[in-house]
Image (cartoon, grey):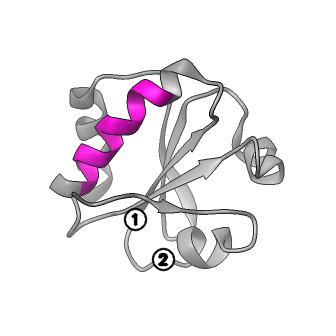
Amino acid sequence: MAKPIEVNESNFESAVLKSQKPVLVDFWATWCKPCLMVGPIIEELADEYTEKFVFAKVDVGQNSKIGSRYGMSLPNIIVFKDGKPAAQMVGFKPKTELKRMLDGVVA
């Protein structure tokens, strides 16, 4: 099973903003129950979309600068393409909605 990479303030630019592939970033926190529910879905999607996307996680509790820059409502899922946000979903969403978002980015 593919695991999303852990991204932090020191590698966010290189891992996300300068990535050749679009990057789905899961902004989450350990205390956020919906974040813990969406985590396994993100891992499933990482397996299914491994050729088209990079999957990353940012713990906003440990990386508050990134969290405040991209919004603190959690879970916050942003797909970055060419260094810019291309799609975003806030709150728990079912796998079908997340897949629709990913497919829209690469369509």
**Residue 29 appears in the rendering:** yes
| Secondary structure mostly seen in the magenta stretch | helix
Per the image, label 1 sits on a secondary structure element best described as loop
Q: Amino acid at mark 1?
A: Pro
Q: Is residue 79 above or below residue 100?
A: below
Locate the N terminus by quadrant. Answer: bottom left
Q: Which residue is mark 2?
A: 19
Residue at screen point 24% across, 66% down:
52
* Residue 14 image position (x, y, % from top left): 61, 79
Which residues, given as a range, are shown in magenta? 36-46
Q: Which residue is mark 1?
A: 22
Q: Choose between 100 and 31: the one closer to the eye.
A: 31
Q: Amino acid at mark 2?
A: Ser
Q: Choose between 100 and 16: the one closer to the eye.
A: 16
Q: Is residue 20 above or below residue 25?
A: below
* Residue 8 image position (x, y, % from top left): 68, 63
Say whether residue 96 is left or right of residue 63. left
Locate the C terminus by quadrant. Answer: bottom left
Residue at screen point 73% across, 32% down:
72
Residue at screen point 30% across, 36% down:
41
**How far apart in space, not on screen, are marks 2 and 1 (Cα)?**
7 Å
Hey, which quadrant is residue 28 in on the image? top right
* Residue 4 image position (x, y, % from top left): 41, 58
Labels 2 & 1 near each other (Cβ < 8 A): yes
Please say whether residue 80 is one of the residues in the magenta stretch: no
